[in-house]
Amino acid sequence: MSGGWLPVAPCTVDSCVAAPTELTGPLRRVARLVGAVVVVLAGLPCTWAARALGGSRADALAMAWSRTFLRVLGLRLEVRQGFTVLGGAAVPMRVVEEEPGSAGALLVANHVSWLDPLVVAATTPCLALAKSEIAAWPLIRSLVAGSGAIFIHRERLSTLPGTVRAIADALRAGRSVVAFPEGTTWCGRGGGPFRRAVFQAAIDAGAPVRPITLRFRDRAGHLATGPSFVGEDTLLASLVRVVSAKGLVVEVTRFPLIPHTSGVDRRALAGLAHATVLGDHLRHDEHLAVAA
């Protein structure tokens, strides 16, 4: 770990990323790459249209664009309902949807790939917490900024309070915000601790937290590490692995909202979300006791 705010996962391409077990043909790969370019280019007018439309129509357009992008890359999206752990027993619970006009929810997920924000956006209307390094990616920068993303300067700790305030303001305005509190990407075989700062935004806004687990797998159900974006990996190399894979699936497991509780601290909230997202099987009532 290279400092408290710039975590570094132990994952590398050589040690963690495996080639797809089933490959698509050359023509299919080219078609997917061309399709991805077309969808990205179409994203700019879509962004402008979303700004003009506003509200639920803008959210629907953003979700449709994200789903289309994933589809042209050959990814199949599966959305599942998770469960909480109460008293040591797994208890299925109905996923409580956000009510229109209420405070938004802080969506927190494990971080595997550059695709993660798009995967979440394809399932839930939300703003993204994006790293400032994206400003170096031509066109993508315009798409991300146009979507209303909140940028975080990870190398400038002094900007963190302002970022937390921006997230809290969005939550109070009824917008959901997706964040990846590990602060870096992992290959999917493991995960890192959750940074607590973003949870302060949920506390300040009185907003609930929605834990989400992301998992990429192949058609046989085995973990697929090709979509991961780790170590010294490049965006192009990861993209090529994705379009080369046959039957790639991304599972999105949405857990019940963790409601805001008066007096809860961000350590307890982060610990509860971490246990849920990464499947540590820690008891929810133990974390809530810490928060009390």
Image: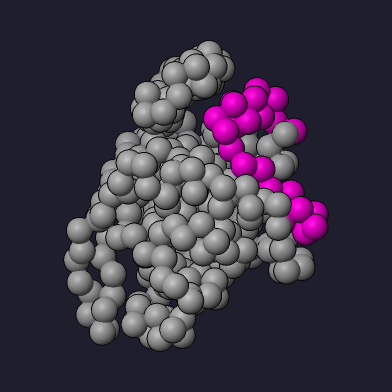
Evaluate whether residue 134 shows in this view: yes
Residue at screen point 51% across, 40% down: 127
x and y, in percent, of residue 23 in the image: 40, 35
Quarter of the figure with the C terminus? bottom left
Which quadrant holds residue 213? bottom left
Give the camera-side residue of 58 and 6.
Answer: 58
The image shows residue 26, relative to residue 242, as above or below, that is above
Give the camera-side residue of 59 and 238.
Answer: 59
Magenta-drawn segment:
136-160
The image shows residue 52, relative to residue 228, as above or below, that is above
Magenta stretch holds residue 1 = no
Q: Is residue 168 left or right of residue 96?
A: right
x and y, in percent, of residue 1 in the image: 71, 68
Evaluate whether residue 25 shows in this view: no
Q: Is residue 233 left or right of residue 117?
A: right
Q: Is residue 152 left or right of residue 176?
A: right
Which quadrant holds residue 94? bottom left
